Image (cartoon, helix red, strand yellow):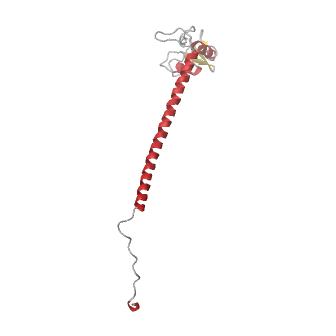
Amino acid sequence: MTSQCSNVVPMSDPTTGAESPALADAPPEGWEPLTEAVRRSGLSNRTIIRHARNASHSITGKLIAGRWYFDPATVPEPMAEPDPAGAATPGMELVPVDLYRLMLDQLGNLHEAGRDLAEARERAARAETEAQFLRTQLQDLRERAVAEAAPSAVPPPAEASPRRRWWQR
């Protein structure tokens, strides 16, 4: 059972070079199972297996009887945890949790106030447009009312007498 990945160690008998079912059941001396590698490294199962299969990573692993085993020397150490005492890094200050929450609440209030202001501006713009439309309508109505109330300079045409036909004259 030889793998194409360079980091996966094939299971073979060191004396004959042939794969042996007896060696397939026993992991190499000092190698740890997947669960231990996960616990020590802080990485997920999938990540460790993917790194073992990928030739560009340095984790060496072997699949034996359906279980993964890894060389502990190649499994990365976990990243350093932050200082539990809460020591601040240079250039940063620690802020009490209550003040931090208060600041977040105020930031949320500012965001809400900005949104309300934008809505008020939209309403004001709509009201201004409507007011301009109504002013125009009122001016047109006034002009019509003045035109109807003023006497016209030209008298209306007098009604013509009905025309008589030639035999009725």
Q: Residue at x 49, y 10 (%)?
A: 89
**Residue in the picture at 39% in, 75% down:** 158
Question: Where's the C terminus, which quadrant?
Answer: bottom left
Residue 135 position within the rendered picture, expressed as x and y whole percent measured from the top left: 43, 49
For image coordinates 44% across by 45% down, the residue present is 129
Residue 124 placement (x, y as % from top left): 47, 39
Residue 77 is situated, as x and y percent measured from the top left of the image, at 54, 11
Where residue 134 appears, x then y in whole percent?
Answer: 46, 49
- When asked about the image quadrant of residue 86, the answer is top right
Residue placed furthest toward the bottom: 167
Asked if 87 appears above or below 4 in the picture, the reply is above
Q: Is residue 56 above or below residue 145?
A: above
| Relative depth, front residue between 34 and 101 | 101
Residue 69 in which image quadrant: top right
Task: Tell me if residue 116 can be seen.
Answer: yes
Residue 12 in sight in this render: no
In-front residue for pair 9/52: 52
Instruction: Give left or right: position of 150 versus 84.
Output: left
Q: How many discs mark residues in the rendered view?
A: 0
* Quarter of the N terminus within the rendering: top right
Q: Residue at x 39, y 84 (%)?
A: 163
Q: Is residue 52 left or right of residue 165?
A: right
